[in-house]
Image (spheres, rainbow, N blue to C red):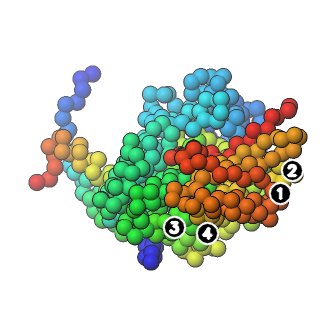
Amino acid sequence: MAQQTSLTQEEETKLLAAFRVLEEFSEHDLPVVKFNCRKAKNELWQALFELDLLPR
Amino acid sequence: MRAELPHGYWNPKIELMPKGKLRRLQLSRVQEAFRYAWKNSPFYRRLMEKHGVAPDDILTLEDFFRKFPVTSRQELERDQLENPPFGTRLALPLEEALRYHSTSGTTGKPPVRAFDTERDWIWGADAWATSLYNFGVRPTDIVMVAFGYGSFIGFWGAHYAFEKIGCRVHPTGSMDTKTRIRVILDLNVTVLCCTPSYAIRMLHVASEEGIDLAARSQLSMIVVAGEPGATIPSTKEIIEKGFNAHLGDFMGTTETAGMIASTCSRRCGGLHINEDRYLTEVVDPNTLEPVGYGKKGMMVVTPLLKEAMPLLRYATNDMVLMERGTVCPCGRTLDLFMGGILGRYDDMVKIRGVQLTPQMIEEIVRGFPEVEEFFTTVENRDGLDTLLIKFELKSGTDSAAAEQIASNIKQQVKTHIGFSPEVGLEPHNLLPRFELKARRFKDLRVKVN
């Protein structure tokens, strides 16, 4: 089976939404939420960067 | 004057949780860990079948404690020797593991080898992050992690945790002590992370270089792990005074990874147990019966939900004393290990009828500020067990003082422990120095089986 070579529009939207959620929670008051979401956000940022999907 | 440490909770949902609710959470996690090990770990499946216990038999924490035996380090070593190189505890295909680490290894035996998945690794670092934040570490801190960054797990978890909190971290793997001191001063390091022995070593080297770290550094916190020094009053005083910083004790084990218990910012003398991640018991080392709050016993620990290498009821040989969390004014409900690790049962020796741990000697010898390093042996001389304490003076100390110090050490050992040792001065820099896992005690008596 051929490898999928790009994201569908729906997948791109979902990924961007996940990033925005993580971005929001990176500023949360609870340290356990704030610091873990910030790390996850930065990892997801890397995927969005490589896919050229970062919001401009 | 040291500023107070900032108070806060990493995860108040857990840290302030009523005890009954916390026990129910632990039970559900133990049941899951037990089921996972039954299904995936050949080592534990064999052990469970041998003792006639299956996941459905664990309905309470008491069931777990009563029906399932403890796992000793010797059993892990034996499994590894019989099934080289990694034993049969591994619960998933090796290619799914992400990281390898090992224990420091006991004399003549191979180290216990362990793997982590990415989830395990994050779990361990997060246990460290919880402990560091609760001690007072914040994103503005500048950190030096002074250890070798080898296969020994040491401070790897701490490194990742400091990064997660957002601190600026300076790894100093290959640096010598003088260079590390220079970095502390030049880069305004606020948190030093190392073993207690190495913290003292750093103070001695700084002193030889004419540097007063208490006056000249920005250090406000010293995070120590790996040895019991932080809870030995005389050692603690040397470190806190020498750096003019708060000392935090952090206890874990290589086999469990992560951080089992640690000092909070209120520093009540106990270490709060990360009870959502570790189920701990304190038992009599001989009968393995629980000893309850307020009594010394051996720590048995179950890390909750390890993926690569599950560990159930691991007998650590660490001597601890558990108290209720309410003893500490910080508000946490999490139980405490008072004084951290008080010693190791496998380090304990009997001399002339007296049970002795290396910490008892350290507490006395570190009470003499002129002493830089020491080493203790037990020997059999003409049929009599003899304790020998060798010590070195700090450079620049008048050697005429040695005789008086030796006599005072001898007197204090006699008073506090119950018999007279032989005490002697050694030339400077002859005794071993340590960066990790200091061993200043050796029993040289011939054992007759």
- Residue type, mark 2 in image: Arg
- Residue type, mark 3 in image: Glu
Q: Helix, strand or loop at disc 3?
A: helix
Chain identity of mark 1: B
- Residue type, mark 4 in image: Gly
> Which residue occupies the foreground of this view, B307 or B403?
B403
Residue A51: % across, % down: 17, 41
Q: Residue at x 62, y 45 (%)?
A: B439
Q: Residue at x 44, y 42 (%)?
A: B148
Up-down relation of residue B108 to residue B30 (above or below): above
Which image quarter is the C terminus of chain B in?
top right
Mark 2 closeness class: few <14, some 14–19, many ≥20 residues within 10 Å: few
Same-subunit check for callouts 2 and 1: yes
Q: Identify residue for label 4.
A: B269
Measure how far apart labels 2 and 1 are at the Cα level. 8 Å
In the drawing, what numbered circle is on residue B304?
A: none
Contact, mark 1 vs mark 4 (Cβ under 8 Å): no
Contact, mark 2 vs mark 1 (Cβ under 8 Å): yes
Same-subunit check for callouts 3 and 2: yes
- Residue type, mark 1 in image: Phe
> Which residue occupies the foreground of this view, B338 or B281?
B338
Residue B63: % across, % down: 74, 50
Q: Identify residue for label 2.
A: B352
Q: Identify residue for label 3.
A: B240
Q: Residue at x 83, y 49 (%)?
A: B351
Q: Helix, strand or loop at disc 1?
A: loop
In the drawing, what numbered circle is on residue B419?
A: 1
Measure how far apart labels 2 and 4 are at the Cα level. 32 Å
- In the rendered image, which quarter is residue A48 located in? top left
